[in-house]
Image (tube, coloured by chain):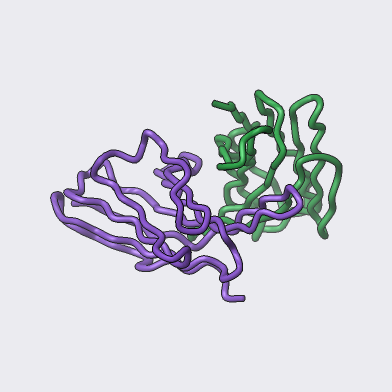
């Protein structure tokens, strides 16, 4: 078990460019979550998938954000026309809900800086 | 949505001291996790504890679900305990996301 893997770990981009982050969950986990964390704050929920279905999206996820999880495996989070306010750590987590328990395991995150 | 508040917001301890971190939440929950975020940003799961008491080495946690709070105890603190501690909850009746608290920033000094 290699844990939750996120790439790239760091991304610096200019305002207006598009960026894409990838998350590879723990292989047997059917749930995958994206969170965003800005400096000094706790992580904020963006969206989550159960298998390939996107079941919930936060209002934080504007039209410039899109997430996919083709075939219920890895997931991508794309941000179009980046703005300086998008600068944050983007965290991915996965879980396997069983017997009522839903224990999330987080990746190391992808830090985005928009210049 | 559910509100999660943590206290204290900041804590400075000398190595070897004990501490108690508190998490209050505004609704009934079926999932509660404590995380430690290290200086590199990695969130490490410490406990899954929607109710009851658990211990893992120098750390222990207690959740009193009926009174809507959880406590994290750190004994004999070490400099490696420094970082931010988050409580996160999932409201009962939902089958979705964890909502995170505001965090407690802990600094352990020599």
Q: Quadrant of the N terminus of chain A?
A: bottom right
Left or right: residue A60 versus residue A107 is left
Left or right: residue A35 versus residue A84 is right
Q: Is residue B72 above or below residue A26?
A: above
Could you say which chain is coloured purple in the image?
Answer: A
Q: Residue at x 34, y 40 (%)?
A: A61
Q: Is residue B29 above or below residue A55?
A: above
Q: Position of residue A62 (x, y in %)?
A: 29, 39
Q: Position of residue A97 (x, y in %)?
A: 66, 54
Q: Residue at x 48, y 48 (%)?
A: A48
In this view, the residue in front, A1 or B107, is A1
Q: Is residue A70 above or below residue A114?
A: below
Q: Residue at x 41, y 44 (%)?
A: A39
Could you say which chain is coloured green in the image?
Answer: B
Q: Position of residue A85 (x, y in %)?
A: 26, 41
Task: Specify the quadrant of the image occupied by residue B6.
Answer: top right
Q: Position of residue A104 (x, y in %)?
A: 61, 54
In this view, the residue in front, A38 or A33, is A33
């Amino acid at each position: 078990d290699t844990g939750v893997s996120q790439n790239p770990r760091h991304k610096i981009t200019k305002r207006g460019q598009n960026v894409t982050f990838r998350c590879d969950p723990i292989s047997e986990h059917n749930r995958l979550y994206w969170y965003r964390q800005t400096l000094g704050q706790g992580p904020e929920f963006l969206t989550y998938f159960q298998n390939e279905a996107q079941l919930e999206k936060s209002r934080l996820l504007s039209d410039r954000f899109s997430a996919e999880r083709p075939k219920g495996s890895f997931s991508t989070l794309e941000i179009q026309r980046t703005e300086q306010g998008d600068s944050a750590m983007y965290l991915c987590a996965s879980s396997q809900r069983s017997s009522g328990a839903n224990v999330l395991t987080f990746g190391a995150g992808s830090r985005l800086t928009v210049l | 949505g559910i509100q999660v508040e943590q206290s204290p917001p900041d804590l400075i301890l000398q190595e070897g001291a004990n501490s108690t971190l508190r998490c209050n939440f505004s609704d009934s929950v079926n999932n509660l996790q404590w995380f430690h975020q290290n200086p590199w940003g990695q969130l490490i799961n410490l406990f899954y504890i929607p109710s009851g008491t658990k211990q893992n080495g120098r750390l222990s946690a207690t959740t009193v679900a009926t009174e809507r709070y959880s406590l994290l105890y750190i004994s004999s603190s070490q400099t490696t305990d420094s970082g931010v501690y988050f409580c996160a909850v999932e409201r009962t009746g939902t089958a979705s996301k964890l909502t995170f608290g505001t965090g407690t920033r802990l600094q352990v000094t020599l």
